[in-house]
Image (cartoon, rainbow, N blue to C red):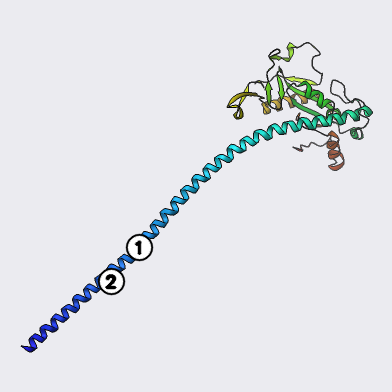
Amino acid sequence: LFLHCNLCETTRSSTMVVLNNTVRRSTLNNNNNNSNGKPKSAAKLFFLTLVGIAAILSGLAIHLSHQLIVQSRHDDDHSRNDGEEKVYRAINEAVNLNNALSALSGPAHVQDGSNHGNNDNIGNNYPNDRVYCMIPFIWNEEMYHTIMSSWGKRCDSIHFLTDAVVGGKLKGDKITDDPDGGYLHYTAFPPGTFPENVVFINMTRSWNDCFETNKRRGGEKEKKVCRHIWEKMWRSWVYVDEHHSDRAEWFCKVDYDTFFFPDNVKYYVHDYKQWDPYNEHHYFGHV
């Protein structure tokens, strides 16, 4: 009986040990599960926080980009107007300087655009490298006389290839309608109204029927010049080839707001490149 009871006690103790070990393992497992779950929850929270911050930063970036675009457009409008004013001022200053020089050299051109001598023109040293100046134009009497009294007189031949419709007042690309004169085809004006080196070209599209929105004036529509550059160019060059190809060896297209030095072209083709204008053909692009 003693042995039996001792065995019972031993068995009970073993059972308790087993139970205790089972409880201990279960407790350890629960602790491990809890310890593993906490890092996962923290990582998830951290990830969601990063996503939220990224979304906020993206929104700020989009807002700032929009503000920069609006500001740049506003600055472009100002800089464009300032640039036009600077061009006009520079040309007027050049005209004043040129007028002072003209008192010594005298006028160099007649109305047909052909150069009949220029005492101070270095181009006279290059009789076989004459320069033809072709100016795409919309009739603007003030600008015409500005060019003709300054750099235009240094071209061996100069012609203004002009849209056939005449009217309005131009300042840069902006048009102010003339309520009295309106817009007329050049043939409606009396003979002799325009200089002989103004060549009118009949375009398929008018230059005075384009508009743009002025945001600084609450979206007001303003007239602007329709350049139609491609059509203007090919029609102008066809005319020059058919009518003026014998007037020069080198032909230059010059914008009306450019201050151009034909003498530099002559030096470039004759002294620097040493091109033969009669046996060689060259296109030297934008200068």
Q: Residue at x 69, y 31 (%)?
A: 81
The local secondary structure at tag 2 comes to helix
Q: Earlier in the sequence, mark 2 or mark 1?
A: 2
Image check: 18 left or right of 266? left
Query: Residue 172 at what x, y percent from top left?
Result: 71, 27
Q: Report crowding for label 2: few under 14, some 14 to 19, many 20 or more residues within 10 A (C-alpha).
A: few
- The residue indicated by pointer 1 is 38
Tell me, for residue 223, which label it has, or none.
none
Observer able to see residue 60:
yes
Mark 2 residue type: Leu
Q: Are marks 2 and 1 in contact (CB under 8 Å)?
A: no
Observer able to see residue 275:
no
Image check: 7 left or right of 196? left
Q: Residue at x 76, y 32 (%)?
A: 87
The quarter of the picture where residue 121 lies is: top right
Q: Residue furthest bottom?
A: 2
Judging depth in this view, the residue of 285 and 160 nearest the camera is 160
Judging depth in this view, the residue of 228 and 259 nearest the camera is 259
- The residue indicated by pointer 2 is 28
Q: Above or below — where is 188 with respect to 229?
A: above
Q: Above or below — where is 12 with respect to 37?
A: below
The local secondary structure at tag 1 comes to helix
Query: Residue 78 at what x, y percent from top left?
Result: 67, 34
Mark 2 to mark 1 CA distance (whole Å):
16 Å
Is the C terminus in the top left, top right, bottom left or bottom right quadrant? top right
Judging depth in this view, the residue of 155 and 48 nearest the camera is 48
Q: Residue at x 88, y 28 (%)?
A: 99
Query: Residue 163 at what x, y percent from top left?
Result: 71, 21
Judging depth in this view, the residue of 151 and 178 nearest the camera is 178
Image check: 15 left or right of 161? left
Mark 1 residue type: Lys
Q: Report crowding for label 1: few under 14, some 14 to 19, many 20 or more residues within 10 A (C-alpha).
A: few
